[in-house]
Image (cartoon, coloured by chain):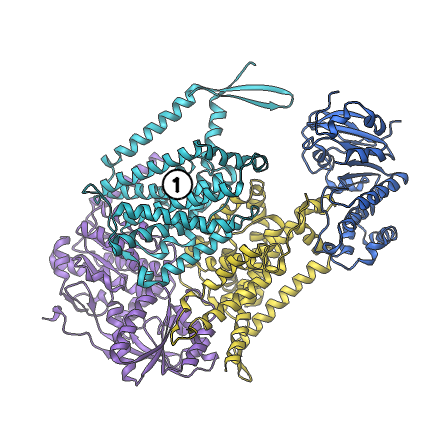
Amino acid sequence: MQLQFFVQLLVSGIATGAIYALMAVGFALLWQTSGTINFAQGEFIMVSSFIILWLMGLLHIGLVPAFFLAMFISMFIFGFLFKRILVDPLLKYGDVPLIIATIGLGMIIRELTRIFWGANALPFPSLVKNKILIFGGLRVGTADLVTIAVAIVIIAALQLFLNKTFVGRSMEATAQNQDVARILGINVDRMILYTFLINAFLVTSAALLVTPKLLAKFSSGETFGLIAFMAAIIGGFNQVRGALIGGFLIGIIDNLAKFYLARVHLPFTDITLNLSPYALAIPLLLLIGVILFKPEGIFGRKEERSI
Amino acid sequence: MSSKLNSTIQGQQLVKTETLKSFDYLTWGLAIALIIGLILAPLWLKNYGLILLCTWAFRTVAVQGLNLTMGYAGQVSLAQAAFMGVGAYTSTLLILKAGVNYWLALIIALLISLLIGFLIGFPALRIKEGHYLAFVTLGFANLIWLVLRNEQWLTNGPLGIRDIPRPSIFGYSLFEPIRFYYFSLIMLALVTLVVWFILRSPWGRAFKALRDNPARSESLGLSQTTYTLLAFAIGSAFAGVAGVMQAGLVEFIDPDSFVLWRGLLLVMMLVVGGSGSLIGPFIGAAIVTLLPEWLRFTGEYYLVIFGLGVIIVMRYFPKGLAGLLPFVKKRFFTREVQS
Amino acid sequence: MKRLLISIVLLFSLSQAQDSVLFIVPAEISGGGATVGNNWADGVKLAAEHINAAGGILGAQVVTEVLDTQTDPPTSKAVIAKGLEKNPFAVIGPVYSGSTIVNMVEAERAKTPQWVGSEAASITQQGNQFIFRTSSGQNGSIPKVTKFMKDEGINSVVIIYVNNEFGQGGRAAAVENFGNLGIDVKLELSTEQQQADFTPEVLQAIMVGADAIFAYVNEEESARLLIALQQQGVTIPVFGEAVLLSQVVLDLAGDAANGVAGHVNLTAEAPVPAVQEFRAAFEAKYGYTPDHNAMKGYIAMFVAKEMAERVGSFDKLAVAEQLHCSLITTEDEPGVLMDIAYDENGDIDRDTFLISIQDGKQVVTGVLPRLKNTCADQ
Amino acid sequence: MVAGYGATTILNSTTIEVHEAALTTVIGPNGAGKSTLFKAIFGMLPIREGKILLEGQDITHLKPLALLEKGMAYVPQGRNIFPQLSVEHNLEFGGISLKNLQETRVRMEKVYEQFPILKARAKKQAGTLSGGEQKMLEIGRAMLLEPKLLLIDEPSIGLSPILVQQTFDLLLALRDRGVSILMIEQNAKKALGISDYGIVLQQGRLAMAGTAQGILNHPEIGHLFLGGVVKV
């Protein structure tokens, strides 16, 4: 029974973790290639789901075409325009003004969403109708399986693109060492633009997968943004793979912590503590531990600097 | 104040410029007018105006603390609001549950914030490069919120603590809005003096030297880690004081008043006002506190316009609004002199 | 800028010149409580429109001024102070208990009656003679759910609550009442707002093996919890309050909501024609389904109207005095939607419903009549 | 013997010249502006005044890609590889300006012939190479283009004496094949010993220029090696 529960928690943790990974990978990409710490990431995700809903209603189209349309809109606004209007002029002043500006941007998106679509949560269609599948004692919903599958396909495609194509490798090179990339003649500015476009794509995908579960709500960006940020730090923000694993870790740890902290037997006593209100603290403690003991992130690589 | 001589190199030519005396007169005049204005404010402000000014005062105190950390030591703290929470809860619990005198509680709150600042800063600041302090304070801010929310036996959880007393001095109660306003104003003045003193002291000069040229200062034997740690701890202690001021003003505290988001807002106040500048915190806190007021006519769009304003300030004045001052000085109050 | 200032002053004096009465509405328009606050403010505005269309109050047109508390207690204190400087007839709001606790002092000092949507028990227990509730609060409604559960033969329970002001208040009341009724609380599980996955809670509930689950979380989380329960094949009954039984949850959870039962204090789904009319009007105007906060805001305005008419003037002190121990029936004032009785503290009571979800629909299984022992019925 | 390469840049009105098919070493104390000079030449820094000429052609405001096309390559100080990419993929970036992947592959084979160790490690992550191998990879990558002028900044830093000698031998071999090399070296004595020409920079200004031998023998130059100031 215990083992079965553990596996169950793991599987459902992976389903949410997969979405978190999508949120975090784009965040880490921007950070890596352009030094942009995007505090509006959560709002990008949140409003993407409203854009999908709006397109579905406006054009009377299904979820999938609306998603692809929204993806292009999102790439234009949160990829191209975001970079051109906000990031490019501000980056030269260092990261703090840009961070503040993205906080301001997040605020604008959040409030405009509230004004246009209201403060109530709106339901959002799911890619598939949820059916419960039973494998032995394990009970898994088809919606979760599809979520995991879509997330993995997207992430695998991204990894293939980054590793197997010349453009992808040029982006990696830009992320690893911008100056050298420039010296070698890589069009660094264009590579950075590509990462913004990819981030916009990932953001829309995350919206597609997370919103059926969490609903479209103007205020949910705050949670998303924090998760993306934390996943990127935990996994090591100088690596796409790190953010990926960070996202999955948060999803899984959340589930395990909530379950196992609910009844903690103190050894040698009859006392059982209910620490479930502190479940949120576990990823935070992990985060602080990572920074203190392995600041490059669990899966990050130490940046070796020569003198 | 004597006028200063600045030299700038433009190509091969050396141009000497001189700041006009009128600039000094103007800035001092404005500063004195502002101080007198603040003292006389209750003459024409009613309850609401005083609450706004008290809010501005405690926010300025918190932002001044953040300015030490960010503006002078160059590290980002996302836990300034959490430290306000530490201060507010410490003093409130001491007063209400342990019957400690208000002023003693204030001092203990300050010391505890200072101590926690050291405890967090010490490990986090070992690594100089990168935003590690920012990440650790991000975690800390969330942990503090969890503790305040979950330890209900102590903090009353999300329902908060009400009926927080306001101080009295020598039996003279500062409960009335006007009196509490002057209390806030004096606290603000005291903190400002402390900051002013810190920056003028050898310490402060070391801060600035480290900010402007870390490598060189290190070679002169200044330890960047030590000074950064001190700046962060003192800055956090200021937040503790600001928290005590907020608790007294609002007469109520709850965990949500000190969440991460409020810490971000304080960072925003500092950067928009001008980090690394003495008046930056005053401007930043004023903008965030008063702007919603001035934008009231825009109805529900006021936060949108506020966000837009923040972006515009960052775009055109990345050093914050306080950065306007040197600009005005250079543009209007400088003349070239023959060398 | 100068021109703008003048026009505002002009507008203000204009509205003063006409016979009008000002209501200030501090509400959570932005920030974490925006869903609740916007419902509340929209309900208030709808009521003002209906009242004005019917000729106003004592011939005066109602003017409402919404003040955003940003779901922030300090801001809520500041904005109500601002509003009170205009000498309004009444304060309608806010909803979050923290914001109310902070600013009710200000309204009391200004001797202005204040109707709030807050549910925290402490609000009406401080002898403040100007504070009035718009729903019975957790202390009024939770005993009815627990009693209902006892009647259903439940002897042990797992509580799943959201760890915020709302959830903690409900949890505290529930634990106390379960204790009184001898129902064993096996486990209390804390959840978060915006929690995506409820599998851990569901598995814990299976492990401890209680007779029932008492769920006290927000709408969206309620739906997610019900779906997770269904997915894990949990068949023990789930009980709850208005939120769990709301239409929104039904829409989101689909057939996972079947079998859920509980007690509902005030809901837009109440099988009362006046409530259904309100709901239709609200949906037509704002394009979304009102929650109970919208109803509370709407009702508060009509209570204020009725009281002004009973007193015969906008005498705030008299209104506050008169309202204690008053009964307002829908015959007196149809806008209150259902009969309301105020007691000496400003707490209220009205008829409530036992509801269960069957085949995706709410079915009223019983009506709990208003308790007649308050001072209003003497 | 003044060849067609004229390079002019302004740090503070500094004019330097680089001779064809010769090894020229730039020396000077810390902060003299040596690396800045290279960055300025290679279009990494905005140039306020002055001109850079390559074979009489103005190349002042060109971007790195254009400079690469013109036959110039630059190996900056420190580690210049992408540690998480394979050796092969690192090398590949040497051929961006060719805009022809087939051609790049052909040339990569040539580099492999010269540096067999790189071929052996082709599929490994570049970060796993030793310091000397990494430097080899960098130089090999720069040579992929068969440049006419190579800028190389402190190639010896962090390398063992044997590797330093190997690196210098490599550079001499390149020079003998007709490549003009402009090198910055901290180890001035050793570098000037193998160079044809020398340039001394001091506080962003040209302090001395001439044959390497001439500079080595200059009476004032000893001060420089002791960290002093040269009076000219």
Which chain, by letter, is purple?
Answer: C
Give whichever of D204, C47 is nearer the camera. D204
Q: Which residue is mark 1?
A: B287
Disc 1: which chain? Answer: B
Q: Name the residue: 48% across, 64% down.
A: A282
Image location (x, y in percent) of residue B7: 56, 22
Colour representing chain B: cyan
Image location (x, y in percent) of residue B230: 46, 42
Colour representing chain D: blue
Mark 1: secondary structure: helix
Which chain, by letter, is yellow?
Answer: A
Q: Is residue C342 above or below residue B29?
A: below
Q: Amino acid at mark 1?
A: Ile
Q: Residue D32: tell me if it is visible.
A: yes
Q: Is residue D60 above or below residue D131?
A: above
Q: Residue furthest top?
A: B338
